[in-house]
Image: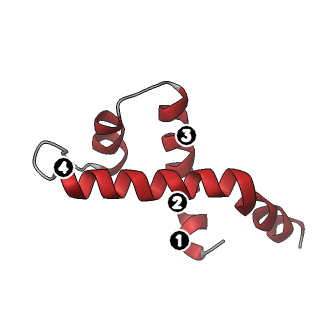
Amino acid sequence: MTDYDRAHLVTYMRLLDAEADNAAWEEAVQIIFGIDPTHDRDRAARVHAAHLARAHWMTENGFRELLKTALH
């Protein structure tokens, strides 16, 4: 887990919530990152996919490191 991950925990949770709600990725990236996918679709898709992948990693692995840090 990186400092970037720690700083973006809320972002990761918002992405996972949007995914669970079956929100369109375009809507999620617009709301969460302020990127308009109609103007910069490639960048918006990359940002969304990368952060969502990291959010999934955090739920599967990263939370262990977060818990270790919190307990020390």
Kind of residue at disc 4: Arg
The residue that label 1 is drawn on is 4
> Looking at the rendering, which quadrant does residue 43 occupy?
bottom left
Kind of residue at disc 2: His
The residue that label 2 is drawn on is 8
Q: Is residue 68 above or below residue 44?
A: below
Residue 16, numbered circle? 3
Residue 41, numbered circle? 4
Would you say the residues marked 1 and 2 are in contact, meaning their CB atoms lie under 8 Å apart?
yes
Residue furthest to the left: 39
Pinpoint residue 33: horizontal percent, then vertical percent.
33, 51
Q: Residue at x 63, y 57 (%)?
A: 57
Report, in whole angstroms, how far the alpha carbon at label 4 lies from the one at label 2. Answer: 22 Å
Would you say the residues marked 3 and 4 are in contact, meaning their CB atoms lie under 8 Å apart?
no
Q: Quadrant of the N terminus?
A: bottom right
* Residue 4 falls left or right of residue 30: right
Kind of residue at disc 1: Tyr
Q: Quadrant of the C terminus?
A: bottom right
For label 1, count other residues whose C-alpha is less than 10 Å away and answer few (under 14), some (14-19) or many (20+).
few
Would you say the residues marked 4 and 2 are in contact, meaning their CB atoms lie under 8 Å apart?
no
Of callouts 3 and 1, the N-terminal one: 1
